[in-house]
Amino acid sequence: MDYTPEDEVLIGGQFEKLLESCGNIARSDDDWNLIRKAFFLAKEAHKGVRRRSGEPYITHPLAVAQIVVDEIGLGVKSVVSSLLHDAVEDTSYTVEEIEAMFGPKIASMVDGLTKMAGVFTTETSEQAENFRKMLLTLSDDVRVILIKIADRLHNMRTLGSMPPHKQIKITSETIYLFAPLAYRLGLYSIKTELEDLSLKYRFPEQYEEIKQKLHLTEVARSQFIGSFNGPIEQRLRESGIDFEISGRVKSIYSIWSKMQRKQIPFEEVYDLFAIRIIFKPSPLIPEKSQCWHIYSLITDIYKPKPDRIRDWVNIPKANGYEALHATVMGPQGVWVEVQIRSERMEEIAEKGFAAHWKYKQATISQDEDEFDKWLKKVREALNSPTESAVDFLDNFRTTLYTTEIVVFTPKGESRKMPMGATALDFAYDIHTNVGNKAIGAKINHKIESIFTPIMSGDQIEILTSDNSTPKTEWLNHATTAKARQSIRNYLKKHKQHNVENGKEIFEAKLKEFGITPSARVFRKVLSAYESKTKDEFYSKLGAGIISLEGLDKVLRENAASKMLKFWTIQLANPLKIFGAGDKRRGQERPQTINAEEPDFTIAQCCSPIPGDNVIGYKNPETGKVDVHKTSCDELTRLAAQHGDRITSVKWSSHKAMSYLSVIEIRGIDRIGILMELAQVITGELDINIREMHVQSHDGIFEGTIAVYVKNIDDLNLVIGKVARIKGVEVVKRHISK
Ligand code: MN
């Protein structure tokens, strides 16, 4: 099937636009010829193929090429490779032929992109392994990844025409990997757009609500910004500075994550915007000094918050970002963030990697900068054969989203660590052997636990002992990829021994009780001891991390509360599971549907209750569908790695059962408050409390209450009632991390 006249008009227009954008990068006739040749080849290759939206397929490579030149700022070779990125697969052209036509560099980029082509379409193979393959191309040519990000961006922009379960898979991958990657490569606006689009398709109502509210508050906000900026503009102009000032509203996604994280409504998000000042540097004074000069002019007008200065001018972020951020007290007692950057810093912030290299080449700096260091770390990680693909991906991801702090060794040498790092991470950063033998740390000359989080400016000395070895527990306190990987490597080496040891201990204990090990026993034990697999349980036991004290209780207790863990949920798409409404053993699925045994497990990471938006994950280990909240981080991780196991579920309305849910409380302590809490919940509301953990210190009490509720309305009722108790300041649903 040939292109219709309408197609030709559409395609021709898009190509014209691309050529226009290439005006800045195409230097010679050769360049123009390459671009034209690639376009015609791709157009021919995709003839007769349409996208889900109905548009001819060639519009996709054209759009990707457009993003690559306009939004990422790459050159001719990248534009050509973008045009060809899906072509080799669909034609009989070989990489050799591409090389003959376009030269070796483009051929190898197209090859890299082609190898990745299958990565996101496979339904069956391990997604994590595919990601790893994709990331391997990072070590050859970063441009390949940048084009892949452009490819993803265009697919996200056109996601509306995909069916819902595909949308969940694609948005999860985007949130889990592509947005962090874009951030890490310094592509701020692309990262923001990827996040916003993910939110838009994943939680359309919440997205629209925030968008609406931003719109409604716009007038008041711009008035405020105007009155805030006025005095600054005047002062900077008087000082002869050439600058632009603007108020930037935060992205919908970042507002949404703040609301989630802090569990607050939109109205309580105060830092909805930041002020950005971009100046044209005067050639005689270093940019750095000019940033501080502007800072000092602004703080003559508005008082700064002393602990909120972010100096990424002296110490750029690892992704190359440079700027000076300050928070100052504006009119009406509102804190306002001000970002100060030069034009060069602005370009790096917007276009990231590509701009970064442009300036780097201009200064012919031979120094290894932060970016090179990171790439080197990624290459090292990729070459590490000991890790499974899933571990690798999780580890890799931790290297993406980090803000750094600067700490010092006893000799005063500075080291960058990610925010939230602990002394243990620092120990491993010094050397694997220092980490493996660490027993404590002297932080600013005071002895502290090795698990202590470290802060910017800390001076840290690691205390070691030859008798110390890494424990599994350490994984809960290690945050850097390097530390986690080293600990895992060590434990893996010693694991087999522990597994055998643990198995022996466990079997002996069961014998004592006269119980034979069964699937039922393991289900109880694994959940009680927070182990995902038998091996994990055995090895924790063998390593002495857990003890079997209270095992009898675990076996009994769980039997009684078993029903509370499993919930009857009706699938949104019954055909898929039951097969034409047939509730007998489904022939189309390996999963057995048994009326006695519930088919769903409530995920403990997010503990959804009826009324929450939920999504199912077909757990291959249990053969059941795990039910997660749609907002669950763990679900996002799973969906990104095994998108094909995601399935829609919805709560059935006919079962009246109780679900465990935890609320957090905090308030002013007074005599009798606990009694009153219990009275309100169990007495007035007739809701069962499973556990109450409340601590009191300095006149403040805080803690958690685990209650059994029927649904979200019940829970909200509890929260509402408890909030009205005198002395209670904060009460909210607990979200486990
Ligand atoms: Mn594509």
Image (cartoon, rainbow, N blue to C red):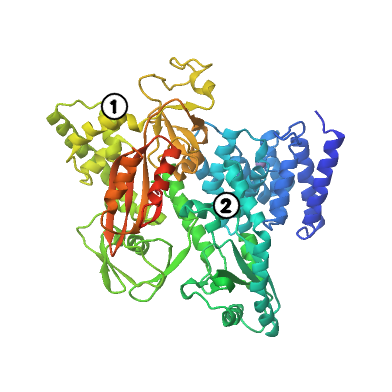
Answer with the quarter of the image where residue 47 lies: top right
Q: Please state which of residues 432 and 162 is positioned toward the viewer in this rendering.
A: 162
Which element is circle 2 on?
helix
Q: How many marks?
A: 2
Q: Position of residue 111 (x, y in %)?
A: 63, 43
Kindly identify which residue carries mark 2.
253
Please give the name of the residue rendered at 17% of the width and 41% of the height, measured from the top-left corner. Answer: 549
Specify the amino acid type for callout 1.
Ala
Specify the amino acid type for callout 2.
Tyr
Q: Please state which of residues 256 and 490 is positioned toward the viewer in this rendering.
A: 256
Whether residue 144 can be seen here: no
Q: Nearer the viewer, mark 1 or mark 2?
A: 2
Q: Position of residue 292 (x, y in %)?
A: 57, 80
**Labelled disc at residue 479:** none
Whether residue 665 can be seen here: yes
- The Cα atoms of the two marked residues, 1 and 2, are separated by 42 Å
> Does the residue tagged 2 have its C-beta within 8 Å of any atom of ligand 1?
no
Which element is circle 1 on?
helix
**Chain-order first, disc 1 or disc 2:** 2
- Which part of the image, by quadrant, shows the N terminus? top right
**Labelled disc at residue 519:** 1
- Please give left or right for residue 210 compared with residue 702 in the image: right
Q: Position of residue 16 (x, y in %)?
A: 83, 49
Ligand 1 is found in which quarter of the picture? Answer: top right
